[in-house]
Amino acid sequence: MLFRLEPRGLRSDFWSYGSPVLAVVLTIVTMGVIFAIMGAPPITGIETFLISPLTSPGGIGSLLVRAAPLIMIGVGLAFCYRANVWNIGGDGQFTMGAIFGGGIALLLPNAPFWWCYPLVLVCGVLGGMFWAGIVALLKLKFNANEILTSLMLVYIAQLILVWLVTGPWRDPQGFGFPQSAMFGAGATTPDFGTTSIHLGCVLAPLLAVALWLVMSRSVLGFQLRVVGQAPRAARYAGFSNARLTWIALLVSGGLSGLAGIIEVTGPIGQLTTTITPGYGFTAVIVAFLGRLHPVGVIFAALLLALSYLGGDAAQISLNMPNSITNIFQGVLLFYLLGVDVLILYRIRRVKPRIVEPAV
Amino acid sequence: MNLVYVSSFIVSIIAASTPLLLAASGELITEKSGVLNLGVEGMMLIGAIAGFATAHATGSAALGIVAAALAGVAISMVFAVLTLSLLANQIAAGLALTIFGHGLAALLGAGYVGISAPVLHAIAIPVLSAIPFIGPILFDQNILIYFSFLLICAISWFLNKTHAGLILRAVGDSHDAAHAMGYPVIRIRYAATAFGGALAGIAGAYLSLFYSPLWSQDLSAGRGWIALALVVFSAWRPFYLLAGAYLFGGVTYLALYLQGVGVSIPSPLISALPYAGTIAVLVLISRDARRVRLNQPACLAKYFHAVA
C-alpha cells in the first residue's frame, strides 16, 4: 500500500469547512467529464448546467422556489441526524402534508384567506407529523428500523395520493386527468408581485435560523447533540432517548409536511399524482452537504436547487435526459463522504520497506 | 381447486419472489461481513439497464446477466472505497449509491425505453419437468430461478460448514479479533461487498430480462429496500430468507391477482400492500430487541481502521 490514513487526533477545522468546497469542485470537474462522454463540450455543459439557469430571466426566482422545500426538509433532517435518527422518508411526510392540508383546502373552496390559509398550513404540518410519528412509534415501541419504515411509508403515501386524485378527490371538471380541483384563493400561498417567489421562500430561511437557535442555544438542542454523539453519556445524564426521538421525528416530519402543503398550494396549485421530484431524498444530501447545520443547509439547498434547474436546462439546450440532476447529486454526495475523511485523518505516504526475513 | 391451478399459482409466486431473493442473499453475505450497504436499490437499477443494454446489443440474454453482475460489482466498489478505505458513514454512502444509481440508470436507459431485448426463456429439464405438480415448479424455470435455488443452499453451506464462512462471520462479529488473528478484514469486506453488488445486479437483470421484461426508469419499485428488510426478517439465516422472500412474493402476487379479478378495492391501495406488509413484518420481527441483537452481526455498519 502506497498511502495510509493517520489519525489527526483532533478534528481539522480547516477541512470541516474545506471538504464541502473541495467536493463541489471535484463534482464540477467530474460533470465536465460526463458531459464530454455524452458528446457535449465540457465547458458548454457546465455553463448550461450551473450558470445559464441563474442568468436567464426569472432564474433567481425559480432557484428560490426550488430551494424552499429543500431547506425546510433539509433542516428537519439535519435535526434528526444530529440525534442519530435516520429519517429518510422526507418525501412521504411531504406528500402526507400535501394530502392533509390539501384535503382541508378542497373542503373549503370559498373560505376567506385570513383563517383558511393558516388552517391549511397547520393541517399540512400535522399531516407530516402524523406520518413521521408512525416511524417514531414503530421505532420506540417495536424497535423497527426507522430507515426502512420511513422509506416504505414514502411509497405508501404516494400511492394514497394517487388513489385520492384518481378517485374520491378527482376534479369532476378535470376532463378525467388525475388531479384535484384547483385550490381556492383562500388556500393559495401568496407570492410577491410578478415574480414566482412565494411566502415559502421567505419562511424557509427563517425556520432554518429558528432551528439553529434551538440547536445551539437551548437545552433541548444540547441534549439532542449528546444523544447523537455520545449515547452512553446521554443515558448517564438521564436524557430521555424516547422523548428526543419523538421530538426529532415530529419536528422533521412537521417541516416536511409544511414544505409539502406550501408546494401544492403555491407553485402547483392543486393535488396531482407527482408533487415532488424527489425533494425528500435530495434533502438528505442537503443535510450532509450543509454539515447538519441549519445555516449550512441554506447554502447546500441553493446549490442542489440549481442542479434541478440545470437538469432542465441541459434537457432543453443540450438535448440530454434531465436525470443528469440525480447524477450530479449522487456524485456530489460521494465526493463529500470521501473527502470528509480528511477531517479526522491525514494521508501519509508509506515508503516501501524491505522486510528482513525472520531468522 | 385442482393441482394444475395450485402449481401455476406457486410458479407465479416464485417468479415474483426471485428478484427479492437474489438481491437479499447478496446483501446477507455483505452484512455478515459487517458492511451495511443500503444501495441495493441503486445497484439493482444499474444491473437492470446494464443487462438490458447488453442483451439488446449482443442478442444474448446470458451475456446480459454477466454484464449486470459486473456492473453491480463495479458500482458497489464505489461504495466500498468510500466506506472501507475512506471510512465514510455507511448509511449515507448507501443512500448516495441509490440516488446515483437512479440517475445513472435513467441516463443510460434513456434510449432504451419502449424497445425490446432478448428475454430469458424457461429451460425445461427433460423427464423431471413432466412430473405433475412438482415438475413445473422446480424443473421448468429460467436459469436465474434455478440459480436462486442453488444459491441459497450454497450460501447456507458456506456460512455454516466452511472455514471461509467462519472467517467471514468472524470479520462481521468482531473485526478487532479477526484482525488480531491475521485475517485481512478490509479485503474480506471488499469481497463481500462485491458479492452483494453482483447479486443485486443480477436481480436487476432478472427484472429487465424476464419479469418485466422491458426497461423503465422505476423498474425496481422499491424491491431493493424490501430486500434489505428481508435480511432483517431472516435474522441473517439463508433458509429463513428463502421463506421470507416467498412470503413477500406471495403478497406482491396476491396484490396483482386481486387487481386482476376485479376486487373493489382501488388499485393504488392494493399496490401499497407489499410496502405495508414490509412494515408489518419488520415490526413483528424487531419487537424482540434482544433477539435482533443476538442475530445481527455485531460489527454491522461500524468503522474498521487498523493502526499499523
Image: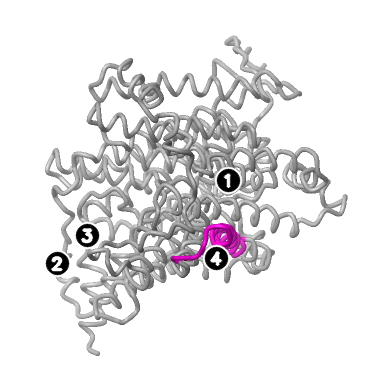
Contact (Cβ within 8 Å) of mark 3 with mark 2: no
Badges 1 and 2, same chain: yes
- Tell me the element at label 2: loop
Q: Residue furthest left?
A: B59
Is A58 contained in the magenta span? no
A97 up-or-down from A19: above or below: below
Measure how far apart labels 3 and 2 are at the Cα level.
14 Å
Question: For the point 40% across and 63% down, which residue is it?
Answer: A161
Residue A120: percent from left, percent from top: 54, 60
Subunit bearing disc 2? B
- Tell me the element at label 4: helix
Q: Quadrant of residue B24?
A: bottom left
Closer to the camera in the image, B215 or A298: A298
Badges 2 and 4, same chain: yes
Task: Return the mark for residue B126.
Answer: 2
Measure how far apart labels 1 and 4 are at the Cα level.
20 Å
Q: Earlier in the sequence, mark 3 or mark 2?
A: 2
Task: Return the mark for residue B282.
Answer: 4
Badges 3 and 2, same chain: yes
For the residues carrying marks 1 and 2, which lies nearer the camera in this image? 1
Subunit bearing disc 3? B
Measure how far apart labels 2 and 4 are at the Cα level.
41 Å
- Tell me the element at label 1: loop
Subunit bearing disc 1? B
Question: For the point 20% across and 55% down, which residue is it?
Answer: B213
Residue tagged by mark 3?
B142
**Which stretch is magenta?**
A109-135
